[in-house]
């Protein structure tokens, strides 16, 4: 069990391969294959699907919030002394591509199932937007002229 599993008393999944749960294959009906906690397989799939949708919405929100932080930091730079502005500019560049979720199995499962294995925090379109925002050259930048 990882992280909060002990807190929430989450039982182990009855399958060796998680992809079995997401496939369209029928679940074995014999009781020896399915513990009582997972006898309602459709409910488990629905819950997993709901968590994947929640994760997807949260990733979108995180991406938007990160972009907004970069917009406002870039706007702030113009009002700071040069020595502070340089440090803040470097801080923006250092944190643009930060992904702190890749060590979580649940996040990696989400990436595989919902994003075709491509990390939503690491794509060319987002990188291009964040680069323009950090330079203040994107049309959505606060100081864009």
Image (cartoon, grey):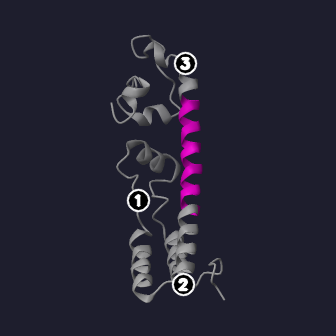
Identified at 42% across, 75% down, the residue is 93
Give the spatial CA distance, label 3 vs label 2: 59 Å
The rendered magenta stretch, by its main secondary structure, is classed as: helix
Q: How many residues crowd around disc 1 within 10 Å: few (fewer than 14), some, or many (20 or more)?
A: few
Q: With 140 as the anchor, is 8 left or right in this view? A: left
Single out the mark in the foreground, 3 or 2.
2
Q: Between disc 3 and disc 2, whose residue precedes?
A: 3
Residue 65: image x %, image y %?
57, 62
Task: Compare residues 73 and 110 and report the one nearer the observer.
Answer: 73
Whether tag 1 and tag 3 are in contact, CB under 8 A, the answer is: no
Q: Mark 1 or mark 3: which is in front?
A: 1
Q: Position of residue 13 (x, y in %)?
A: 40, 26
Identify the residue under disc 2. Answer: 79
Residue 117, image quadrant: bottom left
| Magenta stretch holds residue 6 | no
Which residue in the rendered view is the most extreme toward the top? 31
Secondary structure beneath dot 3 equals: loop
User: Element type at marker 1?
Assistant: loop
As measured in the structure, the alpha-carbon distance from the residue carrying label 1 to the one carrying label 2 is: 29 Å
- Residue 49 falls inside the magenta stretch: yes
- Looking at this view, is 134 or 28 the one in front? 134
Could you say which disc has been placed on residue 85 in the image?
A: none
Residue neighbourhood size for the residue with mark 2, other residues' Cα within 10 Å, grouped as few (<14), some (14–19), many (≥20): few
Quarter of the view holding residue 49: top right
Height in image: 16 above or below 125?
above
Query: Mark 1 sits on what residue?
Result: 99
Q: Disc 2 on helix, strand or loop?
A: loop
Q: What residue do we see at 54% from left, 85% from top?
A: 78
Q: Nearer the viewer, mark 1 or mark 2?
A: 2
**Where does the magenta region start and end?**
45-64
The N terminus - image quarter = top left
Q: Which residue is mark 3?
A: 40
């Amino acid at each position: 069990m990882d992280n909060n599993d002990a807190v929430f008393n989450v039982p182990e999944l009855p399958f060796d391969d998680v992809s079995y749960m997401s496939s369209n294959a029928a679940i074995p009906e014999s009781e020896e294959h399915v513990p009582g906690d997972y006898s309602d397989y459709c409910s488990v799939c629905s819950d997993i699907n709901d968590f994947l949708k929640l994760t997807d919405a949260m990733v979108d929100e995180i991406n938007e919030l990160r972009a907004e932080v970069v917009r406002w930091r870039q706007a702030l730079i113009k009002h700071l002394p040069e020595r502070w502005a340089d440090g803040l500019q470097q801080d923006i560049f250092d944190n643009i591509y930060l992904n702190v979720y890749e060590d979580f199995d649940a996040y990696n499962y989400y990436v595989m199932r919902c994003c075709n294995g491509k990390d939503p925090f690491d794509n060319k379109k987002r990188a291009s937007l964040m680069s323009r925002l950090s330079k203040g050259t994107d049309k959505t930048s606060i100081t864009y002229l």
